[in-house]
Image (tube, coloured by chain):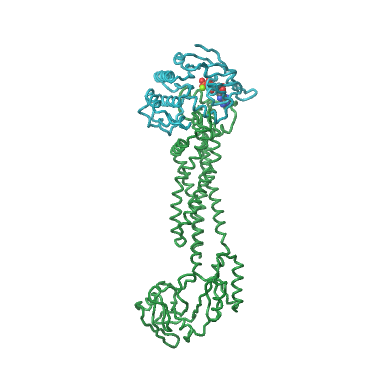
Chain colours: A green, B cyan
Amino acid sequence: MKLDRNNNGKILLRIAKNNLISRPLASIFSLLSIILATTLALTVTLYLTGTKEAEKRTLDNMQHVMYMNVTEEQVAEIAADEKTEMTVPYKPCETEFETDGVRFSFVYYDSIKEGIKTYIVSEGTVPEEYNEIVVDKAFMDALGKDAVVGASLSLSLNGRTEDFIICGYTDDHYTMLTHPVRVSRAFADQSPEMKDLPYTALVRLKDASDMPVSTFTTAVYQIALDCGVNRADVNINGKFEESLQNGGVSFYVTLVLSTVIALACGIVIYSIFYLSVTSRVQQIGQFLTIGMTQRQVKKMIRREGLLLNIVSVPVSLLISGILSRLLLPDGWDLKNYFLLGAVFCIFSVAVVQLAIGKPASIASKVSPIEASRSSFSGQGSASNRRTGCRKKASLKHSDRTPVNPRRSLTPLRLAEMTNRDSRRKWRFTAVSLSFGGILFMIAAVWMSAWDDEAYSR
Amino acid sequence: MNILSTNGLTKYYGAGPSLVKALDGITLEIEQGSFTAIVGTSGSGKSTLLHMLGGLDTPTSGSVCVDGQELSSMDPNELAIFRRRKIGFIFQNYNLIPNLTVCDNIVLPVELDGRTVDRIYFREITDTLGLSDKLGRKPDKLSGGQQQRVAIARALAAKPAIILADEPTGNLDSHTSQEVVGLLKATGKQFHQTIVMITHNDEIAQAADRTIRIEDGRIAESRW
Ligand SMILES: Nc1ncnc2c1ncn2[C@@H]1O[C@H](COP(=O)(O)OP(=O)(O)OP(=O)(O)O)[C@@H](O)[C@H]1O
Ligand SMILES: [Mg+2]
């Protein structure tokens, strides 16, 4: 006879489901803490990776370093350096001018969409002739004019007036007080206002994102040295440098946070199941009596945890998805979401199973004769009282029946007493509740902390 | 032929001055297909004996042999499987699983064994016990007598060789008691089962093939 075979799983799942339904409060509480914990951990992780993703997307369109006060020849030299991937000449004119009460300043760089994003002409063309310019539509609004391609515009510069032709418009609607007027290279090189100003080279280095910070800065200063740029004129993009520095930080934050949350959640699940198992000693005894094996008892309790996960995981995924989408639309990445979602699903199941392990093994150690101890099923008949009370002599019953000194105090007996001692029960509930509270507080604190940080950026 | 036998069975609780000899050397043999009633005063050790026979508890010394198998050689998992295949239990408090339907309760031992219920047999027992129209209900919606009939159906479901019943009529009125015992006896005969039943009711004991009286953990009388 193959005694250990034939453990049918389906019936266990059905019993597990019934067990959960028959204790709705405990189940709901377990569900809530799993949902809360999973959602919290997943949302924070999504938020952190989202922030990183958004930052990466911004940095992908920015220069790594600016070499200021350089000549056209130096720009060419920098562009020729094999360490650089992209070099953009840039000439800002710091002098502000004013026309009809609207402030503006000249700036020269080419229209570039990728790598180092400058400006994108939404209508018209880029400036090529000396007096062609590109302005934002907001500038025309401020001047009270229609944004028509080819319109001429005279701007009063200090002491003189220059007629320009607007060859294109941008649609950025900057909120800056000083409107940028993008001029042609000819204007930048020849106009009295700009011809004596130095160039700035906006540079992206090859493979810089994968470099350690020190390698990156060394390369940056090497280029400066090679092309005769003063050290003081080297302006490294701080954000980019920072991104090289703390690449791993958010990973550790996620790890520590998830561990704390997992611990809190695990303790809640542990206490709930501990309580539930000790209050089910008789029923477990019944299962054992009619032939459930210890292994099946363990499995049944574990299935209860699994069912809780099956219900709570989709809810957590949904909430986390919506939350991180709302918090951080720029950093939303579907692939990331599914990947992290899957990781945290497994994590959540693992934590619950880990927490249930001990209660499940306690349950499996219940003796089948617990089933015939009848007093706490509350069916009081004459013979029940006769046999029951004697066996059930507990502290509470001591006024009626003396505690039987012959009964050994096994852990099981203790567990059984826990069930009937409402004070003990209360203590457990209080522990569970307070951990739930802690979990909730961590949630609140972290959410607000991350919000603050987002603001301070 | 003996389906069940014990040899020098003892069960002691506690030690020293507080030692309780719940069973103090029980040697008995029970014939296949017989209906045995166990009687005795409260605390005489009847339930303890029944637990030993069903492999629910382990004896201090002595042996229990069921259908040629020595129970002391089995570990808890093997005992559980032994129970669900060989033994049907009926208790005074019915011991039904409250959140499962009557039908689920009845088939539970069979399903735990990874088998499916023989439908014809299932219909036969539920018809005999008058449960056919109550299969979808939860046990707490049934009367005591009906609940005990469900417990009998469950004990019969796995076609066990032996039915062990501990005061199955303890919570029932005398009329229902007679009815339940009648059913138990009838199904036992119909399905060739051996029945061992503890009872305080003399009338019920009269109906048995054999009566064993236990006093202070010993067999005081065995009457055919
Ligand atoms: N777990 C236990 N620990 C200590 N003593 C026990 C234990 N279980 C039973 N006893 C003792 O063993 C003796 C026999 O108990 P048992 O339950 O077998 O009596 P019983 O004949 O079934 O009585 P009743 O008719 O009241 O059900 C009693 O004295 C009882 O107190
Ligand atoms: Mg008894």
- Left or right for A171, reference A284: left
Q: Is residue A286 depicted above or below B178 in this figure?
A: below
Task: From the top left corner, tell me how far across and down residue A311 is, in percent.
Answer: 44, 45
The residue under the point 56% across, 15% down is: B219
Task: From the top left corner, tell me how far across and down residue A441 is, in percent.
Answer: 51, 52
The residue under the point 44% across, 58% down is: A325
Task: From the top left corner, tell me how far across and down residue B172 is, in percent.
Answer: 42, 22
- Left or right for A104, reference B3: left
**For residue A28, what is the image quadrant?**
top left
Q: Is residue A60 depicted above or below A15 in this figure?
A: below
Task: From the top left corner, tell me how far across and down residue B173 is, in percent.
Answer: 41, 20
**For residue A240, what is the image quadrant?**
bottom right
**Residue nearer the viewer, A241 or B43:** A241
Q: How many marks?
A: 0
Q: Is residue A357 depicted above or below A78 in this figure?
A: above
Q: Residue furthest right?
A: B16
Q: Residue furthest bottom?
A: A159
Q: Is residue A291 depicted above or below A105 in this figure?
A: above
